[in-house]
Amino acid sequence: MTPDSLRAIADTVGTPTYVYDANVTIEQYKKLHQAFNPLDVKLH
């Protein structure tokens, strides 16, 4: 996400607005899943 794209979102929907980067979320989920993998934990 670029500052310009975030400004455009804020201009469209107002603030405060929470915007999440799907790629970052997926990578963080993978790290979490990998950390708990030895425990056979189910993440949803």
Image (spheres, grey):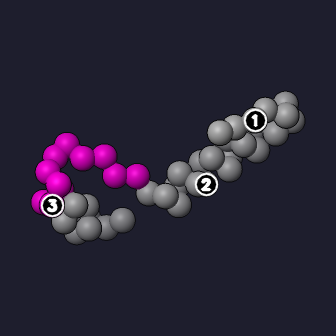
Magenta stretch prevailing secondary structure? loop
Q: Which residue is mark 1?
A: 42
Which amino acid type is marked by label 3? Thr
- Please say if the residues under marks 2 and 1 sit with CB atoms less than 8 Å apart: no
Q: What span is colored magenta in the figure?
A: 10-20
Residue 10 image point, x, y percent: 18, 56
In what quadrant of the picture does the C terminus appear? Answer: top right
Label 2 or label 3, whichever comes before in sequence order = 3
Q: Is residue 24 above or below residue 41?
A: below
Helix or strand or loop: what does disc 3 sit on? helix
Residue ID at (68%, 50%): 30
Which amino acid type is marked by label 1? Lys
Which amino acid type is marked by label 2? Glu
Local crowd size for mark 1, using a 10 Å CA cut-off: few (<14), some (14–19), many (≥20): few
Front position among marks 2 and 3: 3
Q: Which residue is mark 2?
A: 27
Q: Which residue is mark 3?
A: 12
Residue 41 image point, x, y percent: 78, 32
Name the side, left or right, on which 35 lies relative to 18: right
Front position among marks 2 and 1: 1
